[in-house]
Image (cartoon, helix red, strand yellow):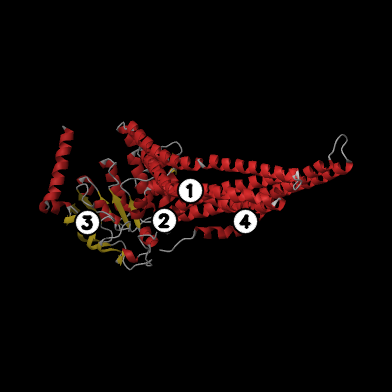
Amino acid sequence: MKRVRLISFLKKYWIFAVISPLMMAGEVIVDLLQPRLMALIVNKVVSTGVTGTPDPEVMSFILITALKMILLVAFGGFCGIMCCYTASVASQGFGNDIRVKSFNKVMSLSLEQTDRFTTGSLVTRLTNDISTLQDFVMMLLRMFVRAPIFFVMGIVMCLSLNVNFALVAVIALPLVLIIVTIMVVKAVPIFTVVQGKLDRVNSVVQESVTGARVVKAFTQEEHEIARFEAANADFRNTNLKVSYIMSAIFPAMSLVMNAAVIAIIYIGGLQAEADKINIGDIMAAVQYITQVLSSVMMMSFMFQSVARSKACAVRVREVLEADPAIVSGTRTAADEVGTVRFENVSFRYPGASGDNVLKDISFEVKKGETVAVIGATGSGKTSLVNLIPRFYDATDGEVYVDGVNVRDWDLKALRSRIGFVLQKSELFSGKVDENIRWGAKDATDEEIVEAAKIAQADEFVSKMEEGYSSYVAERGASLSGGQKQRIAISRAVLRHPEIIIFDDSTSALDLATESKLRQALNREFADTTVIMIAQRIASVKHADRIAVIENGRITAFDNHENLMATSAAYRDIYSSQMKSNEGGAD
């Protein structure tokens, strides 16, 4: 596993990352000079004892010094604007690049890994966690420069006015540092917990919104609301723990700061009474000690940001450093076309306990052959076909496509040979033709229509108000189950693959429509290998061969007629469905 250094994402914006602190330094220097200039004005006025008509020399001094202050403020404002601009460019670019890289990594992960992270957690990591890191970079380029300069130079300027003011700093600073250290040490461990609680909130939202139809069908709105409220309350309570700790910093710091100001005024008053310091210098000292202690308060927020960002950085790096469990091979071509072979294949889902889902599976599918897979729910049908495009790797044994071990195939080359119609039809928000064009991005409009006709989708798409330009809602919510399946089938056949896999993806079609689909496939894809999972005998009886799976094993593999004669399990399925049909006819 290659360690990812998140700071490396700033290299691209190094010039902005360099300019920003320099501009901030310029702004801070201006802020540090202002009290000194104000002290000069006050000292001048007090020393001359102006009464009645102002002395022209004093007024000239005041005006010149005020002009200097105005020019410095203008310069400081320019530095502040440039600092904000350059820091924003660097931090936004940093966040954008990490988010893109993280999303690319998520797209390269296997199903096993995305299942382990969970959808809600991945959403949190790519949004909230990266945004936190982005804000941290902004603070790094601004506050991490501002606070230390104020801290060091404020003390220097304060001591330059009167050494006795050092006593205030010597007493106040350790108290402030102790307060900050105690608070931060207590808060740091909670930040990681907070992000985990946010994962849970996002997961509940994602599940409830995605499964909205099921929630409504079973009138479980109150249950889901209660589940969300529980997760949200847990997130809130954990956040409150951090807030309680961090909120104690404000009154404690304010107490120390006000005490320091009082001490400066008291010491300064004694010094002024002894004619050892000017009134203006006391005023400047108050401002400087306030700046010093404020910088320490700023640093406390920086430590809080560091703690939160550290927790987020660990979570983002877990994504970026995840090595894909399915590693692409290098093979891009083969001598055979459209063949599939399983040799002694067993499979167990990663991290699962108990028996293998598939046990010692061996069979071969020839080019142009239509093979159906049938069996009880949970017998391993979907797991079997998931091994062909390497959604998962076999635990034992070997799977071959076109005579080449799937582990040796370049993943893109392997999957481009296969048209996979999933059990759950996944459509994306956009137009109908955009969803079909997923099968082949360069396909013409005529090819899209032809694919839709083969999939029996043209008959309803052409009747839609805007035809193939009609909008499909997110996850195909605006379409029926059968319509979604036919668009998904259109997408698969558009790429003219060597192998088409139907994972129970015609279940929402009536038998007449399914028969038309089968006839179109036989006519247009006579040389294409078809592997079909189905629950209905009527859907598979026309296949060249039918594999019967029981408890993860293929117990029979032949055509319909022979299976009726030799396979008790197949006859049981046939009989139960025929009786069910007869019952429905009564």
Can you say which quadrant of the picture contains the N terminus? bottom left
Q: Which of marks 1 and 2 is in front?
A: 1
Residue bearing mark 3: 358
Q: Which of 454 and 378 is in front in this view?
A: 378
Examine the rendering and report whether any part of residue 208 can be seen. Answer: yes
Q: In this view, does 58 lie to the left or right of 521?
A: right
Q: Nearer the viewer, residue 9 or 272?
A: 272
Distance between the alpha carbons at the discs numbered 4 and 2? 28 Å
Residue bearing mark 1: 182
- Asked which secondary structure carries label 3, the reply is strand
> Which label sits on residue 16?
4
Can you say which quadrant of the picture contains the C terminus? top left
Distance between the alpha carbons at the discs numbered 4 and 3? 56 Å
Residue bearing mark 2: 318
At label 3, the amino acid type is Leu
The mark that comes first in sequence, 3 or 2, is 2
